[in-house]
Amino acid sequence: MWGVRVPLLCVCAFLLLPRTVSQPPAESDTYTECTDGYQWDAQTQHCKDINECETIPEACKGEMKCFNHYGGYLCLPRSASVIPAPDPPSQLPHSPSHGDSETFNSCPLGYELQGNNCVDVDECEQDTHDCQPSQECFNSPGGYTCQCPEGYRKVGTECIDIDECRYRYCQHRCVNVPGSFSCQCEPGFQVAGNNRSCVDVNECDMGAPCQQRCYNTYGTFHCRCDQGYELGPDGFACNDIDECSYSSYLCQYKCVNQPGKFSCACPEGYQQLGTRLCQDVNECETGSHQCAEGQTCVNLYGGYKCADTNRCQDPYVRVSDNRCMCPVSKPACRDLPFSVVHRYMSLTSDRAVPSDIFQIQATSIYPGAYNTFRVRSGDDGGDFYIRQINNIGAMLVLARTVTGPKEYVLDLEMVSVNPIISYQTSSVLRLSIFVGPYSF
């Protein structure tokens, strides 16, 4: 018989009871039919128990477990414990009329007879143990034990996961998992060799995405840029700083932005002075002009001009370089200035006004003569005026701001009057003024 130890659960069992063996034909010498739950074993000539738990697919449904016994089977909860009584005869006679002796298992509980020896039954291998699904079965001589896996503790008949994180094994974060735990570190740290502590990660040595320079700090890192660059919104990329866009005073003429820096450029006809200023190139002194023979090189701001050496026009005749005289013997000279002297000068654009730009000085002084100065021609817009200093000198003043390139040809006249001898004469300084295109 079977003894069943069941916890406080509903036990549903299906027991197939043996029924009377049907009588074989009278002429047969052996019986080949067995009761329900048994089948004929031709080798032993006995009826052998059928293990319905193996032959019937899904003999027990749901959480029920199938337990085979002689002539039938039981469906019990998996938590039920079945304690077998001493084994009944290993074989049932096929007929009570036979005189064969019945065989019994004479071995202790947990052993089975193999030949003349009692051999331990491995309940774990044969799956005849009653360990819970969460437990592990360990075979022992004559029996077995149910143990919880590592990381679990036994509560009643169940194995409950041990929450190792309750003991604070980890420096930063502890993550409990079934049967174990793992330590995790905050960003910027990694788990040390003891699997519990956290050590700083040097992101700079591990390929931090800094475009230029990387500085490791505790738990993180920072990207920095070289001079002339600024850190982008993503904190990694370095973008060039356009210094030229910050100020218009960095360069005198033109600011040229370059990766990480800037430079100043000067227009044609100028050369750089220092790092930001521009200086006019005097082509007349450097010999880089292309003036022909009979011409004079006149330096201008940003260039030069080739002027004819002899600029005297009839009725004037040349008496020296840049000086022309109108002889009194020529009738056409009667109403013209006695002499014309040619001079050249260059001005920068947008010069502050009023500004003294050219001084006029008489070269011949006659006793008793009074000298006056005026702009005879060339100043149609009123950009200039004469300020007389004394009887023999005057100053040409720029009255308005002018922007080049532009050219003026002014006739600055000095009129000499001697009232004692009723004598009057004049001379002209023909001044060519070239206004450069820039303020430098």
Image: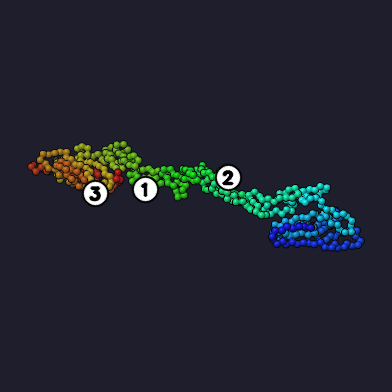
**What label does residue 195 carry, if any?**
2
**366, above or below 136, in the image:** above
From the top left corner, tell me how far across and down residue 97 is, in percent: 89, 59
Q: Earlier in the sequence, mark 1 or mark 2?
A: 2
> Residue tagged by mark 1?
246
Q: Secondary structure at mark 3?
A: loop
- Classify mark 1: residues with Cα within 10 Å, few (<14), some (14-19) or many (20+): few
Circle 3 sits on which residue? 400
Contact, CB < 8 Å: mark 1 with mark 2?
no
In the rendered view, tell whether residue 68 sits above or below residue 407. Answer: below
The image shows a total of numbered marks equal to 3
Q: Quadrant of the C terminus?
A: top left
**Residue drawn at x 30%, y 45% as measured from the top left:** 438
**Is residue 262 visible in the rendered structure shown here?**
yes
Report the Cα–Cα distance between label 3 and label 1.
32 Å
Instruction: Answer whether residue 253 is visible to the viewer in this image.
Output: no
* Front disc: 1 or 2: 2
Task: Residue at 22%, 47% (x, y): give it.
Answer: 354
Q: Quadrant of residue 191?
A: top right
Q: Secondary structure at mark 1?
A: loop
Q: Secondary structure at mark 2?
A: loop
Q: Work out how far the residue at label 1 is from the one at label 2, CA to CA, in angstroms.
A: 54 Å
Between marks 3 and 2 in the image, the one whose residue lies nearer the viewer:
2
Q: Are marks 3 and 2 in contact (CB under 8 Å)?
A: no
Work out whether mark 3 precedes mark 1 in sequence or the reverse, and give the earlier one.
1
